[in-house]
Amino acid sequence: MSIISFTLLFIIKINFMKKMKKTLLGSILLCGIFLSSCKKDNSTYQENEITATNNIAVSVTPKGYLKFTTTKDIVELSKKLFDPKTKESVLTELTEKGFKNRKSNITSYSSNPTSPYDLIFNSDGLLEVENVIMKITDDDKFIYTLKEKQANSTTFNNLVKEVFDTLTMNKINVDRNATSPFNFAEFMALNPNGQQEVLSKAI
């Protein structure tokens, strides 16, 4: 399963689903799909809310990345972004709110032009879900995690620059062994920081 790793093994094309189910983000999305029948959290959020996407709890932070309340919201927005009928309208709305996806950054985008993560991670490779800020590396190999409550100017800049800090971050493989279940929320609860994985040879 690929990491946050960031996304749609459902209604989106079969070839995309095959790739995602082995990634960390894929596992996050699978968890979101499982929880999608649960009642939605009605908590409010303060950044630029996305209002025309069927009540999906996603906002654009002042730093320009998407912030999702739950993994279910990633699933729902991803469905729209990978659906040709809704993709452009959603991207337009996100852009108007200050979001620039990874495709807008020629440096990171060109490193992997077929990356399935380019539409939901921002131009710095950032995304937040359930109060965890994630930074995906340009080669889609790793995700760095930083809890929002630990984010300050120093730790945030280190995250963007991929400078690992064992006291505040994790460094997790995107590609994960598909035979070993991975629960991202559970992992973060048990390992808020300090985990630095080596490159996986997941199959």
Image: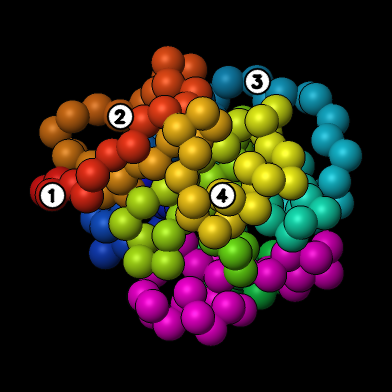
Per the model, the C-alpha gap separating discs 4 and 2 is: 23 Å
Name the residue tied to disc 3: 39
Quadrant in the picture for residue 74 = top right
* Image location (x, y in percent) of residue 80: 59, 59
Per the model, the C-alpha gap separating discs 3 and 1 is: 37 Å
Q: What's under tag 2, amino acid-wise?
A: Phe
Q: Nearer the viewer, mark 4 or mark 3?
A: 4
User: Start and end of the magenta stretch?
Assistant: 91-120
Name the residue tied to disc 4: 159
Residue 41 is labelled as none
Q: Earlier in the sequence, mark 4 or mark 2?
A: 4
Q: What's under tag 3, amino acid-wise?
A: Lys
94 within the magenta span: yes
Quadrant in the picture for residue 91 = bottom right
Q: Are marks 1 and 2 in contact (CB under 8 Å)?
A: no
Per the model, the C-alpha gap separating discs 2 and 3 is: 23 Å
* Image location (x, y in percent) of residue 21: 28, 46
* Disc 3 element: loop
Per the model, the C-alpha gap separating discs 4 and 3 is: 33 Å
* Image location (x, y in percent) of residue 197: 28, 39
* Disc 2 element: loop
Q: Earlier in the sequence, mark 4 or mark 3?
A: 3
